[in-house]
Amino acid sequence: MKSVSNYIGLLILFLALISCKNEEKKITAKKETQPNIIYVYVDQMSANMMSNAGNAYLKTPALDYIAKNGIRFTRAYTTNPVCSPARVSLMTGRFPGYFKDDKGNEIRENRGSMKIPTVSQEVKNTTIAYYLKKANYELYFGGKEHLPESLTPDALGFNKFSDDERGELVNKAADIIKKKYKNPYFMVVSLINPHDICYMALRKKATSKNDAVLLKRAKVELAALDEAMKIPEGVSEEEFYANHCPPLPKNYEPQIDEPRAVKRLINDRPFRKNARAHFTDNDWKHHRYAYHRLTEVMDKEVQVLLDAIKNSGQEENTLIIFSSDHGDMSASHRMEHKSTLYEESANVPFMAMWKGHIPKGQVNEMDLISNGLDLLPTVCDYANIEGVSDARGKSLRPLFESKEVSWRETLGVESEIGKMVVDKYGLKYTRYDVDGIEEQLLNLKQDPFETTHFTNDAEFKDDLARLRQIYHTEWFK
């Protein structure tokens, strides 16, 4: 009996060892899996412009599906809340301000960003394309670029599959998704909407030569805007503004002690100045209504991508990441467009989904995310290659997969009119610099709509000094 007992014991031990080895192989195989990665990058969408974020004035079933089956971050920020600088970060993983234009000026806005000369070899060897090619990924890019010549998809080695920014783009992306590939792929789908909302204020006061040229070229954009602005059939104007439009925001009025820099931003463009001075309450409501409808247009386009992934059987082999280059003020502080450091402009949506790998239904309301700094190290992590550009960028993989990780406590953001540092407690230090130096300390917990500031409040004296020092030593030396 003793020998039989020994035999059984040895057998159990042997089976246990085999089981452990098999489990180890599974874990290793899972770790070494290189998923297809699709980055859906939209234009001018604020973080709250999704029904999954609690916005009851629109329906975004495609984006809700990503959130339901993955993770949504509420504290994600752009590196700079305007198109071209943010897109420079997408490609390079660096702040736009790292680069200089052809006159040696720090990159802060669209015009300067488009004049970045040939980038250094160091930058070329640390772009998102460079790393993913090293990891044997096929690279695809479709849609809006708005990048300087040295950082275009073509220059970096992407296969540019569509110049369209709307329905044709997602249909061509769907065709690529449906094919079978020997190597994994990384695809950027760069959609334009809800950016068409820009033209509502612009066409009312396009007095400058550049604005007139923009309008002349914007036939498709204006048609999309007109469709989004249509009052539903059978609805009177009175009923439309009372019951169909989103209400005016809680921060509809300009901020108390509004910085000179913000006033200057508004007054530098006639259409912005006109909107603040002359838009009626109903004009602003109509603006918000159209902004929501254009976001729904984009959501339908994202649905085409999700359907293609699901129907091709690739959903469990595809990491989907969704974000925006910046937001829109959408009547907050009686402003439209972007470029400010207010939350509506700088706080962007950021979600990720990979079935079987990222736990579903997560909402991360604490951790500070930079889509411009963090995307590169994140996709490299999933591609099983280390990618470092700006060392302050961090792989989001541990957060995606709900693992314990030490995370940043502050985050920097640049803009045309100044720079800011926000911390994990909701405090926000802003330093404006285009009309003299102006400092503000905001508190997003006590005043989430940034209606005032706490710069001179004795209670926050130490916080002001702390964030001022962090601004100068950690983010903007």
Image (cartoon, rainbow, N blue to C red):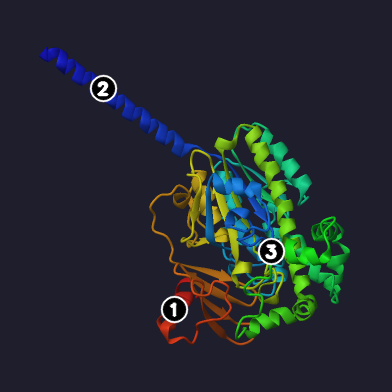
Q: Residues within 10 Å of mark 2 (few under 14, many from 20)?
A: few
State the SS at label 3: helix
User: What amino acid is labelled 1 in the image?
Assistant: Gln
Q: Residue at x 66, y 75 (%)?
A: 252
- Between disc 2 and disc 1, whose residue precedes? 2
Q: Residue 149 at what x, y percent from top left?
A: 72, 59
**SS for tag 2?**
helix
Q: Secondary structure at mark 1?
A: helix
Instruction: In this rendered view, identify the residue nearer to me: 40 or 283.
Output: 283
Badge 3 amino acid: Ser
Q: Which mark is residue 14?
A: 2
For the residue pair 24 and 72, the one nearer the viewer reads as 72
Quadrant (top left, top right, bottom left, bottom right) of the N terminus: top left
Near mark 3 (Cα within 10 A), the count class, few <14, some 14-19 or many ≥20, is many
Residue matched to label 3: 84
Residue 121 in sight in this render: no
Relative to residue 468, is residue 232 depicted above or below?
above
Residue for badge 1: 469
Left/right of residue 34 with respect to residue 192 in the rendered view = left
Depicted 426 relative to depicted 432: above or below: above
